[in-house]
Amino acid sequence: RIVIEDYNNSAVTETTEVFTVKPQEIYITYPISTDTFIVGRDYYITWYNEGGVDSVEVQYSVNGGADWTSLGTMGNTKYYKWTIPNYPSDNVLVKLLDTKNSNVNVISDTFTIIKPSIAITSPDSLSHWISGRGYYITWDYTGKFNNVKLTYSTNNGTNWTSIVNSTANSQNYLWTLPTFDTDSAVVRVAYDT
């Protein structure tokens, strides 16, 4: 309640009705605890706030909050586009701080950062390919990379021969097998740096 009193006559007063005063607060809406972010991809950190928060500092931790790295200070746009750094961890946090009052801050739920990966879907251990014919090498991937390189081995990975040094990461490549006879052939698809 607020009481207003006449300075010259204390008998003249007015008292407001009871009302609520809320503290300034920031709430993170993304990321959440079930999220998995992939190194190199862009994600948006999003939030909303109550009260006057003009600008925020965005920080992250890959060790559960023991250490924090600043991503910068910005106007309170309610989002930040973050390119995920190469620090895989299952103990990642994001923190937002009001730049005028560091007591107004919030820490996200714990989430995960993983490295990009490639999983070859063909050929597999049941494949029987014939020299001179064309077959599709196929793969799935997580991460952000535009090109891949493909190699093969006829001796279970002891020696490698190039199929193609760099090709678009289209998740498949038509390969005409050279002439060789082996029961120890393997194919490798790798991120092309």
Image (tube, rainbow, N blue to C red):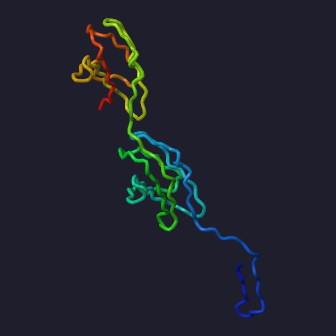
Q: Residue at x 44, y 46 (%)?
A: 82
Answer yes or no: is residue 170 visible: no
Q: Give the answer, above or below, for where 143 lies relative to 85.
A: above
**Rendered residue at 50%/68% (across/down):** 103
Locate residue 152 relative to residue 42 in the image: left or right: left
Q: How many marks?
A: 0
Which quadrant of the rendered structure holds the N terminus?
bottom right
**In the rendered view, does 140 fall on the left or right side of 163?**
right
Residue at the extreme left of the image, as rendered = 159
- The quarter of the picture where residue 2 lies is bottom right
Q: Nearer the viewer, residue 121 or 105?
A: 121
User: Picture quarter containing residue 138?
Assistant: top left
Residue 32 lies, with reference to residue 1, above or below; the image says: above
Write the residue at 51% across / 54% down: 108
Q: Is residue 156 visible?
A: yes
Instruction: Give how far across and how far down residue 72 sits, in percent.
Output: 41, 55
Q: In the image, is residue 147 above or below residue 163?
A: below
Give the x, y percent position of residue 105: 51, 62
**Figure quadrant of the C terminus:** top left
Q: Position of residue 171 (x, y in %)?
A: 42, 23
- In the picture, measured across the screen, residue 179 lies left or right of residue 107, that is left
Which sits in the foreground, 190 or 3?
190
Q: Nearer the viewer, residue 55 or 121?
A: 121
At 74% across and 92% down in the image, what residue appears?
10
The image quadrant of residue 140 is top left
* On screen, residue 61 above or below 123: below
Where residue 126 appears, as percent x and y from the top left, is 40, 16
